[in-house]
Image (cartoon, grey):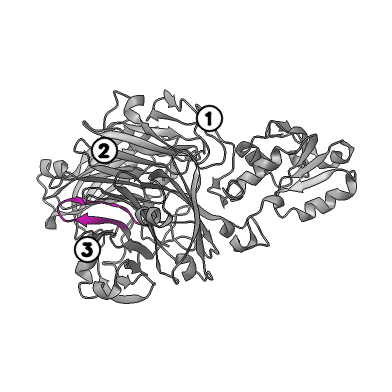
């Protein structure tokens, strides 16, 4: 595994790997490392050298030792070296001293009097981004300096990609934020670097592969787009919706942002159904190669890992056909990805026998969680507690299939129950699922379950909740599932996966209910709903009002229509019953105002009384549709 610090649930993200791995500075670092003959000492005042050595080849350097100022770290192993006391450095004969830190001036000033006059001293300050790219030049590793993310980006064979978000940094007070962008092809070669000016605060941000390819005169490509928000404020996470669409209306899908923190393991990757092909898109997030056997895939619950058989170059992209690795695996079997921190949340793409494709993402497997016996004891405090919630699309047209997914490495079983509600919040069906083993192969067809129990959903739709069944054991708070939607009219499909949360209660449990801003409890909603890219693409939203304990009888929701510049054009009130749901289309709610809002409008779903959970998508008549969970900011 790549030995870098990325994200901790205790302290949050570590931006160091983003700073030294930024594609604008990595060539200079490599060039410098090849021009340092003679013995060198490494001074590691902040514990960064382990990550640095993982990302860059330091084996060719004549490193005499790694020196640390902290007494308690003396004797620890750092990148294969035994850490020595910095007090011993003056007695060591070297030509170079490398201070592995940014903003290293005070560290260098303290060392200089103790070094020979002909000893050169260098630090990471030689490899800084230009000051104009920094929000806070005085603190280089401030997270806002590295509001970066990567995205699957394709414009090839009539298939296109569209990234949509809003200038929410401007809404937090950012002055003239902009995007620095670098596009890598499948081999990791830089084929375009440019900047984009962002619209006014709240304005729509769109990166369309078809438009960019034409504007920059690029060849066809399938690769990844490196996105850096310059001048960010309030939020160092780059959130976006990723649509894939085609020259033909039948090509349509959507998925979520990449999650900028590489993890060791990912799950929520289904095997193929009959006639399908499942491809895992492996996209190297770093300036170092993924070595052969550095990334692998296994069936869930199995120790038999199929490893990458050849290296993958920095920032390169490769499609892994899972049928070639696991010829006998079939849905509802599922896989986990042994990613070794080489990739951010990877995408997978499923092609059906009829040629239609859908794209979705895997999710991070937690390594720090074990089943918590206190959850069951806290039921009076937290009620249902964690809820994994998803739409049941109109049953007269769609099949809704759920596949629970183990998402913690320590999770050997899942005690679950399924609860189905109609749109008015009435419980229609409750089904205990037992204590599912890690390698279970249980999929749940909502329509078949309702038909078997002779239950009809009022209005023909509703939502499903997967919850922990405490009578069967304890949960770990990381309950996930894949929800698949098959359109019987068009033959098109979509799928989405997400994790559970606690919703709408006064009490808190650890960090739940979560909030997009501020500490828990998260008792408000601010969700972003984008419009379609083609005139025939109707943007829809499926809003759900889940409750862990009884809450307000109805939501107090407002749908706010904005134009592409972030100016509010109209608003419409909405009340959703507790445990209920609501499906709406932008062009129906704002029939008269959409033309005023113009192209690239969007809707903010706002509620200050409760937290709603939402799914968005596009509907292209009877031809195709897309669906995924929403994001907020």
* Mark 2 vs mark 3, CA separation in Å: 28 Å
Residue 111 x/y as whole percent: 84, 48
Q: Nearer the viewer, residue 40 or 577?
A: 40
The residue positioned 62% from the left and 44% from the top of the image is 27
Residue 196 x/y as whole percent: 47, 62
User: Residue 287, located in which quarter of the rendered image?
Assistant: top right
State the SS at label 2.
strand
Against 291, is 97 above or below? below
Q: Which residue is mark 1?
A: 291
- SS majority, magenta: strand
Q: Which residue is mark 3?
A: 584
Mark positioned earlier in the residue sequence (1 or 2): 1
Mark positioned earlier in the residue sequence (1 or 3): 1
The residue positioned 53% from the left and 69% from the top of the image is 174
Q: How many marks?
A: 3
Against 167, is 129 above or below? above
- Asked if the magenta segment contains residue 401, the reply would be no
Residue 109 x/y as whole percent: 83, 53
Q: Which residues are magenta?
A: 614-630
Q: Residues within 10 Å of mark 3 (few under 14, many from 20)?
A: few
Residue 98 x/y as whole percent: 76, 43
Against 613, is 605 above or below? below
Q: Nearer the viewer, residue 336 or 176?
A: 176
Q: Residues within 10 Å of mark 2 (few under 14, many from 20)?
A: some
* Mark 1 vs mark 3, CA separation in Å: 47 Å
Q: Which residue is mark 2?
A: 351
Residue 247 shown left or right of residue 225 in the figure: left
């Amino acid at each position: 595994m790549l030995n870098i610090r990325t994200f901790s649930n205790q302290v949050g993200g570590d931006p160091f790997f983003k700073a030294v791995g930024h594609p604008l500075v990595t060539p200079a670092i490599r060039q410098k490392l090849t021009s340092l003959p003679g013995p060198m000492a490494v001074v590691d005042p902040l514990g960064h050298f382990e990550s640095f050595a993982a990302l860059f080849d330091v084996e060719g350097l004549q490193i005499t030792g790694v020196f640390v100022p902290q007494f308690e770290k003396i004797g620890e192993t750092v990148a294969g070296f035994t850490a020595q006391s910095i007090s011993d450095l003056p007695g060591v004969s070297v030509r170079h001293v490398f201070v592995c830190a940014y903003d290293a001036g005070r560290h260098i000033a303290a060392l200089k009097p103790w070094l020979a006059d002909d000893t050169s001293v260098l630090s990471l300050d030689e490899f800084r981004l230009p000051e104009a790219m920094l929000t806070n030049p005085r603190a280089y590793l401030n997270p806002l300096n590295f509001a970066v993310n990567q995205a699957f980006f394709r414009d090839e064979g009539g298939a296109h990609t569209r990234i949509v978000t809003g200038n929410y940094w401007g809404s937090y007070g950012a002055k003239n934020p902009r995007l620095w962008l670098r596009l890598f092809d499948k081999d990791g070669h830089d084929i375009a670097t440019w900047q984009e000016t962002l619209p006014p605060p709240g304005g729509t941000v769109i990166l369309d592969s078809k438009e960019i390819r034409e504007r920059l005169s690029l060849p066809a490509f399938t690769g990844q787009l490196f996105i850096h928000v310059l001048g960010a404020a309030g939020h160092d996470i780059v959130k976006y919706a990723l649509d894939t669409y085609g020259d033909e209306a039948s090509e349509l899908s959507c998925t979520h942002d990449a999650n900028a923190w590489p993890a060791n393991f990912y799950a929520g990757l289904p095997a193929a159904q009959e006639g399908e092909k499942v491809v895992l898109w492996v996209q190297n997030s770093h300036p170092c190669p993924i070595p052969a056997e550095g990334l692998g895939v296994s069936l869930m619950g199995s120790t038999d890992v199929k490893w990458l058989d050849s290296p993958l170059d920095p920032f390169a992209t490769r499609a892994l056909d899972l049928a070639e690795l696991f010829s006998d695996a079939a849905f509802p079997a599922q896989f986990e990805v042994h990613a070794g921190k080489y990739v951010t949340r990877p995408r997978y793409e499923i092609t059906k026998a009829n040629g239609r494709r859908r794209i979705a993402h895997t999710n991070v497997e937690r390594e720090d969680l074990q089943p918590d016996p206190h959850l069951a004891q806290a039921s009076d405090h937290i009620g249902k507690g964690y809820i994994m919630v998803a739409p049941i699309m109109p049953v007269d047209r769609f099949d809704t299939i759920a596949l629970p997914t183990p998402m913690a490495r320590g999770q050997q079983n899942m005690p679950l129950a399924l609860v189905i509600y109609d749109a008015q919040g009435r419980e229609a069906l409750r089904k205990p699922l037992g204590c599912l083993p890690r390698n279970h192969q249980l999929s749940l067809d909502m329509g078949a379950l309702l038909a078997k129990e002779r239950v009809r959903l009022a209005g023909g739709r509703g939502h499903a909740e997967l919850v922990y069944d405490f009578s069967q054991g304890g949960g770990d708070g990381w309950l996930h599932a894949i929800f698949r939607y098959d359109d019987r009219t068009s033959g098109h499909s979509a799928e989405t996966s997400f994790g559970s949360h606690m919703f709408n209660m006064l009490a808190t449990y650890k960090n739940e209910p979560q909030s997009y801003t501020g500490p828990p409890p998260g008792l408000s909603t601010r969700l972003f709903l984008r419009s379609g890219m083609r005139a025939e693409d109707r943007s829809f939203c499926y809003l759900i009002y889940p409750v862990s304990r009884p809450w307000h009888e109805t939501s107090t929701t407002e749908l706010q229509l904005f134009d592409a510049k972030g100016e509010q054009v109209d608003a419409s009130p909405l009340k959703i019953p507790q445990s209920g749901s609501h499906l709406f289309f932008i062009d129906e709610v704002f029939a008269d105002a959409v033309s005023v809002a113009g192209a690239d409008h969007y809707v903010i779903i706002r509620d200050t009384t409760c937290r709603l959970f939402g799914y968005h998508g596009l509907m292209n008549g009877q031809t195709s549709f897309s669906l995924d969970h929403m994001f907020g900011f």
